[in-house]
Image: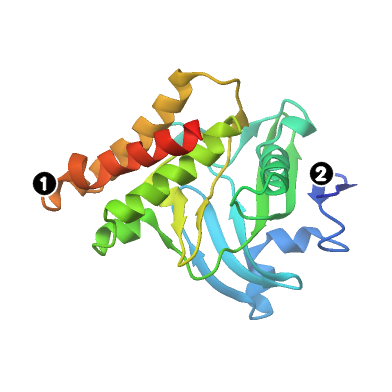
Amino acid sequence: MTSERIEDDATGAILFDPASVPQVTGDWFDPAFWRAGERLREQGGGRGGVAIVQTPVGECVLRHYRRGGMVARLLGDRYLWTGRDRTRSFREFRLLANLSERGLPVPGPVASRYVRHGMRYRADLIMRRIADASTLAECLADGRLDSTLAARVGELVARFHREGVWHADLNAHNVLVGDDRLHLIDFDRGEFRAEARGWRESNLERLRRSLLKLGAAERGGRFQEAIWGPLIQAYEKAFGA
């Protein structure tokens, strides 16, 4: 079971699991700290600033929260302060911990923090890296997304939905495919919801739109038959099991 420790300072707080890591300092959330020690392996851009870092507890992913869309031009990486327990980083840390304890395939949370600036704050999250995995989007691009893999994805989503887990951004980039196991990642704004067909179907439709946007229907013209049909059939079977 994940335990919690919160270390407060003058500007914010750090939440971490002392059973996994005895102590976490603010340096852990600065890519420059890891780069200086030659322990930053990769750093990417995109909406969320992501770096792969070699920490004392193993290889991890460091993510800086950033807004997307038009609002990013105004607020960038700043969020409205509504209380410590409602910060994006603390909420995602705790959700990941809960999901891990339920045996669901997600990255294990290591630490999170927020830095407050008046009525705004910035946030970061450190998670264990899932090694040797490709995104579903990469599998599609490489021609590896067939009916068998599609069925595995359907079963994966059904596992989370059976637990009442709503993923705020279920898309092909947030499904990781390994040799033996699939994972879901990026649970920012995710939450538990009461059973209802509406939000489950909306989640699935978001995934479908993602695949179509990435060109799934253009690869052989058999998207419904070869990919989406097997995915939904496996989902319905697993959800009803």
Residue 241 image position (x, y, % from top left) = 51, 35
Residue 172 image position (x, y, % from top left) = 37, 48
Residue 64 image position (x, y, % from top left) = 60, 51
Answer with mark 2 or mark 1, whichever residue precedes in sequence.
2
Mark 2: secondary structure: loop
Q: Nearer the viewer, residue 29 or 178?
A: 178
Mark 1: secondary structure: loop
Residue extending farthest to the front is 241
Taking 197 as reference, is 85 left or right? right
Res 105 label? none
Q: Nearer the viewer, residue 58 or 208?
A: 208
Three-letter residue code for mark 2 = Thr
What is the spatial separation of the Cα atoms under label 2 and label 1, in whole angstroms?
A: 54 Å
Q: Which residue is mark 2?
A: 11
* Rendered image quadrant of residue 128: bottom right
The answer to whether residue 159 is above or below residue 108 is above
**Residue 67 visible (yes or no):** no
Taking 90 as reference, is 217 left or right? left
Q: Nearer the viewer, mark 2 or mark 1?
A: 1
Residue 74 image position (x, y, % from top left) = 49, 33
Which residue lies at the image location 60% right of the left edge and 64% below the top edge? Answer: 129
Which residue lies at the image location 41% right of the left edge and 48% below the top edge? Answer: 153
Q: Nearer the viewer, residue 108 or 39?
A: 108
Res 221 label? 1
